Amino acid sequence: MTERVRCPPRSHGESSFLMYRKDLFAKAGLTMPQRPNWQQVARLAAKLHDPRHGVAGICLRGGPGWGNLLMPLNTVILTFGGRWYDEHWNPRLTSPETKKAVRFYVDLVRLHGQPRPAEVGPAECLRTMRQGKAAMWYDSTALAGSLEDPNSSKVAGRLGYAPAPVVSTASSGWLWSWSLAIPVTSKNPQAAWEFVSWATSKGYPKLYGERLGWVRVPPGSRMSTYQLPKYQQATKAFVAPTLHALDAVNLVHPGVHEQPWVGMSYVGIPEYAGLGNRVSAEISAATAGRQSVDEALARSQIFARDVVEGGGYRDQGGERESPEQ
């Protein structure tokens, strides 16, 4: 079975943290705080931004998509004290706290971020960072292995890792998993189960490390992986920050306010994918300079209200009523 796998399956869990160039910080006489806040990050980005030499102060996702721009931005909104909805499902995308968070993010990436920020996603930021063209990057913990791979990254061995920046919360960051599943329509469910069992077994990370490199072993999948000496050695730069990031997330109460769903980088309702895509497109347009943040959030507020009114979300202690009730 293993000989036939050309594109290895990856199931892993991830949070988010701040990745930064220790060499650029040292050259500029700067120090990354142990627990940075977003205001400190913005000041550092301003000092490190060097477009004449092709180096952005920070790289951040700016392209549309609920799984693109909104993954990091939602954590910023929460730690600023903003939110999508209050505990009664009233949309809060135009609240002062949410506006402040989105303005901060948009201004940061426009002033001190990578070129054409409204077109950027994690793949573009990864390429930018690996090529040495950004001083900082706030994104998934699962991407650190690619940065520390000397075969593909110019900055391997020159990076530091700090917790997800905060403002009004004790911690921040997202929590996400990429998983393998067997569809009910599978014609060979037993063979599929054998494959999934193998791909999520203790032996898989060992095989992955031996054949493809220990630094790239899928993180956040099994605690036993973190006990492997070769993995510990290859990932010593980011293994402890990764575990800390995964453990620090408050899944139930990630922001300042109570929320009637569980989640921090998304709203845990079936309609969120469509809603998130529409809202992210508006904010991405603000990032591109085609409209203001206030205009983007005013439209987004309407989208968010349409979802709760059409989906039957009412004041039921976080429960959902059907529209017919």
Image (tube, rainbow, N blue to C red):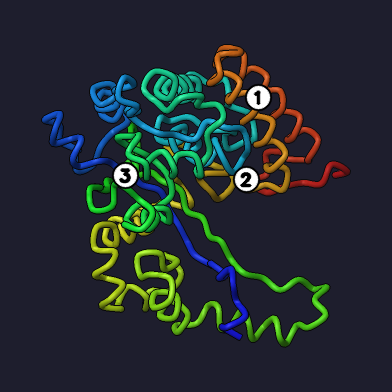
> Which disc number belongs to residue 46?
none
* N-term-proximal mark, 3 vs 1: 3
Q: Is residue 219 above or below residue 273?
A: below
Q: Which residue is more in the foreground, 21 or 274?
A: 21
Q: Amino acid at mark 2?
A: Gly
| Badge 3: residue crowd in 10 Å (few <14, some 14–19, many ≥20) | many
Residue under numbered circle 1 = 300
Q: Is residue 31 left or right of residue 61?
A: left
Q: Amino acid at mark 1?
A: Ser
**Residue placed at 45% from the left, 57% from the top?**
14
Q: Is residue 35 left or right of residue 277?
A: left
Asked if labels 3 and 2 touch by Cβ distance under 8 angstroms, the answer is: no
Residue lying furthest left: 29
Residue 130: give x, y in percent of width and height. Answer: 37, 45
Q: Secondary structure at mark 2?
A: loop
Q: Quadrant of the N terminus?
A: bottom right
Asked if labels 1 and 3 touch by Cβ distance under 8 angstroms, the answer is: no
> Which disc number belongs to residue 19?
3
Q: Is residue 294 above or below residue 36?
A: above
Q: Amino acid at mark 3?
A: Met
Residue under numbered circle 2 = 317
State which quadrant residue 259 falls in: top right
| Badge 2: residue crowd in 10 Å (few <14, some 14–19, many ≥20) | few
Q: Gap between marks 1 and 2, in whole Å?
A: 24 Å
Mark nearer the viewer, 1 or 2: 1
Q: Gap between marks 2 and 3, in whole Å?
A: 39 Å
Mark nearer the viewer, 3 or 1: 3
Counting every numbered tag in the picture gives: 3
Asked if labels 2 and 1 touch by Cβ distance under 8 angstroms, the answer is: no
Q: Secondary structure at mark 3?
A: strand
Q: Gap between marks 3 and 1, in whole Å?
A: 30 Å
Residue 4: give x, y in percent of width and height. Answer: 62, 80
